[in-house]
């Protein structure tokens, strides 16, 4: 159970199998897995189950939960560094266009860079299936009632996915602008996607997420002529929360601004 926000339970979490792309079914050899991954499985120590200790720990439950998560996240980060894997955590509210942006990005990159995806949703493999349709290996993590991914889920998924060295890993988090800001997954950076169909004051309403993110992507800019959305004000709000945050405006549907996003990825 996430004692920070009260969501989910470890027994509800399901780590799916690595999905085969359409190319696999055509007889084309899929990406070679990284055999070094078998040595990086994180085995957490058994936690105390003595009920008498529960009351003593109530005041520091959140600290304990995040502390354990950060320990596993550090393990994941070490793994990514050792294997030269660029891991990015894509975060947003539901409906921002994360999956569409991701499929567009993968189609643009897949011939030049080996990519992998970990998909986070409470239920279904719908988004993972959309990723696999691009020919990229994806694994679905269903969190049950959980509203975010955590470092242990990512470690478990990596153990099955086994990405190659020098690859690019996209982690698409559960749609939520609250709890994912608190949970380090071991990623190089968080990328927050904000659709222009949402309010321009989202950075002020959810400051922790925007403060934790290195890049803000303003998506669906092709819809701006039909909306009452103040782009300059939105960017100003984001800079107010985090002066260092970078901003890219694009449309995952039309491809407008996509080159700037791809250049940002290359720079990382």
Image (cartoon, rainbow, N blue to C red):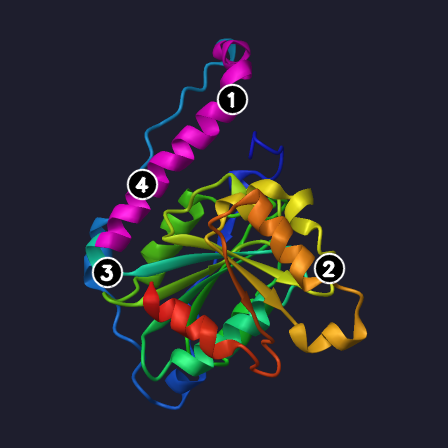
The residues colored magenta run 53-81
* SS for dot 2: loop
Quickly name the residue at label 1. 61
State the separation of the CA atoms marked 4 and 3.
15 Å
What is the quadrant of the C terminus in the image?
bottom left
Indicate whether residue 64 is drawn in magenta.
Answer: yes
Callout 4–callout 1 Cβ contact below 8 Å: no
Quickly name the residue at label 4. 74
State the separation of the CA atoms marked 2 and 1.
34 Å
State the separation of the CA atoms marked 3 and 1.
34 Å
Quickly name the residue at label 3. 84
Crowd around label 4: few <14 · some 14–19 · many ≥20 (10 Å): some
State the separation of the CA atoms marked 2 and 3.
36 Å
Q: Nearer the viewer, mark 2 or mark 4?
A: 2
The x, y position of residue 19, in whole percent, is: 44, 71
* SS for dot 4: helix
Indicate whether residue 166 is drawn in magenta.
Answer: no
* Residue 12 visible in this rendered orientation of the protein: no
* SS for dot 1: helix
Crowd around label 3: few <14 · some 14–19 · many ≥20 (10 Å): some
Q: Earlier in the sequence, mark 3 or mark 1?
A: 1
Q: Nearer the viewer, mark 2 or mark 3?
A: 2
State the separation of the CA atoms marked 2 and 4.
34 Å
Quickly name the residue at label 2. 198
Crowd around label 1: few <14 · some 14–19 · many ≥20 (10 Å): some
The x, y position of residue 220, in whole percent, is: 66, 72
């Amino acid at each position: 159970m996430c004692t920070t926000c009260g969501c989910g339970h470890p027994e509800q979490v399901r780590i799916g199998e690595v999905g085969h792309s359409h190319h696999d079914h055509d007889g084309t050899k899929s990406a070679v897995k990284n055999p070094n991954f078998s040595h990086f499985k994180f085995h957490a120590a058994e936690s105390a189950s003595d009920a008498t200790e529960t009351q003593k720990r109530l005041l520091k439950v959140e600290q304990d939960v995040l502390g354990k998560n950060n320990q596993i996240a550090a393990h994941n980060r070490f793994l990514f560094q050792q294997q030269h894997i660029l891991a990015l955590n894509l975060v947003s509210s539901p409906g921002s266009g994360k999956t569409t942006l991701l499929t567009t990005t993968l189609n643009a990159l897949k011939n030049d860079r080996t990519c992998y995806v970990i998909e986070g949703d409470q239920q279904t493999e719908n988004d993972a299936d959309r990723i696999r349709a691009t020919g990229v290996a994806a694994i679905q993590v269903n969190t049950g009632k959980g509203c975010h991914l955590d470092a242990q889920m990512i470690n478990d998924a990596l153990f099955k996915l086994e990405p190659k060295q020098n690859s690019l890993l996209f982690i698409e988090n559960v749609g939520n602008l609250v709890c994912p800001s608190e949970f380090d997954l071991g990623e190089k950076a968080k990328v927050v996607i904000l659709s222009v169909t949402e309010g321009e004051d989202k950075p002020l309403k959810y400051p922790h997420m925007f403060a934790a993110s290195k890049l803000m992507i303003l998506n669906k800019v092709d819809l701006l002529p039909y909306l009452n959305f103040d782009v300059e004000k939105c960017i100003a709000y984001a800079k107010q929360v985090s002066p260092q945050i970078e901003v890219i405006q694009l449309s995952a549907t039309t491809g407008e601004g996509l080159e700037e996003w791809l250049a940002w990825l290359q720079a990382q």
